[in-house]
Image (tube, helix red, strand yellow):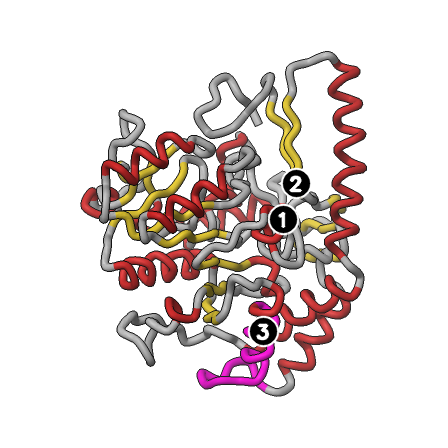
Amino acid sequence: MISRSSELFARARLRIPGGVNSPVRAFGNVDGAPFFVSHAKGAKIWDVYGKEYIDYVGSWGPAILGHAPKVVVDAVREAATRGLSFGIPNPLEVEMAELICDWMPSIEKVRMVNSGTEATMSCIRLARAFTGRDRIIKFDGCYHGHVDGLLVKTGSGALTHGRPDSAGVPQAFADLTISLPFNNTDLVRRAFAENKGKIAAVIVEPVPANAGLYLPSDGFLSILRNECTGNDALLIFDEVITGFRLARGGAQEIYGIKPDLTALGKVIGGGLPVGAFGGRAEIMDQLSPDGPVYQAGTLSGNPLAMAAGLAQLRELERINGWKLLEELGAQFERCARSAINHAKTDVTFHRVGSMFCLFFASGPVVDLAARGVAI
């Protein structure tokens, strides 16, 4: 008998490339097959057979309050009665902008977009325009969306320019991107020295969470801040994952670093498609219609996404969700470390807030280049 999920996947493959709308959902890298979700509530999801699962993924980040929290659903339902999309400004956009700027002091002005990829793409364009430079430094294992100039890996040498990590990305785009090992401050300084006056920005996940979980070494982020300041380059924090998850003010609050630009997403949409980018006013004022840097979006600031995001963020603040997540994360870490010690096996455990990862290797695991590591 063919399962309902198998039947749906077969149908999907006929009309959707690979049968999915985002590659990870195919489960191909773990020799699995996708199952199709019927509905979700709280920490549980149900497939099309009605089989119940505990969900440890949370829609890859947005469902920080669990699935379909009443406060968010009610906000979306109420907003929907007033219209689904306007294509002109609405009051909820202003409320969201004010909240983001209040909670993240590095952000003086912010613009809403529809995805994290749009947010990082816009940060890069803005940084290049503001500095009048073209080259970008990123770090191995840091994923910043499917932006042409950021889908690159390090070349054969530590400081070679990147090579495309996807077909369809021109080498000329990759040539403007320098990818370095995370936590390697010597190579950061060397990259600036060898590209003096050419680096527009450094973009980094303050806590890389797309290839396991790597923690910034002591001083790494502050050195990035100092090198960018000393070389008139911009520091961009990609907080699409960490923003409003690790703390009220994101990872930049925890590590005490003030970036020039920040990319946001996931949590701020309450489960609906969303992204945002913001930073210093003098940089953000370069955006059209006031400045020469073009950026636009039909659904940017969509009232349903704004309503969902505002409801979720305000509920997080009301219940002090970040304190609860830290307490639960610490409790899990104690149990995990106890099990690791009891097993007497080579496992390295990383955690910050509610984000954690097990590396099946002896530590330290400081970057993507660590050999013999399984996640």
Q: Is residue 358 above or below residue 63?
A: above
The amino acid marked with disc number 1 is: Ile
Q: Nearer the N terminus, badge 3 or badge 1?
A: 3
The residue carrying mark 1 is: 254
| Nearer-the-camera pick, 143 or 60 | 143
- Answer left or right for 173 relative to 328: left
Q: In this view, does 105 lie above or below 239?
A: below
Q: Give the range drawn in magenta.
A: 83-100
The residue carrying mark 2 is: 352
Q: Can residue 214 be seen in this view?
A: no
- Where residue 372 appears, as percent x and y from the top left, is 50, 17
Q: Could you tell me how far apart the alpha carbons at marks 2 and 1 are, in whole angstroms? A: 10 Å
The amino acid marked with disc number 2 is: Val
Front disc: 2 or 1: 1
Q: Is residue 190 visible?
A: yes
Q: Could you tell me how far apart the alpha carbons at marks 3 and 1 are, in whole angstroms? A: 22 Å
**SS class of the residue under badge 2?**
strand
Q: Is residue 291 above or below residue 133?
A: below
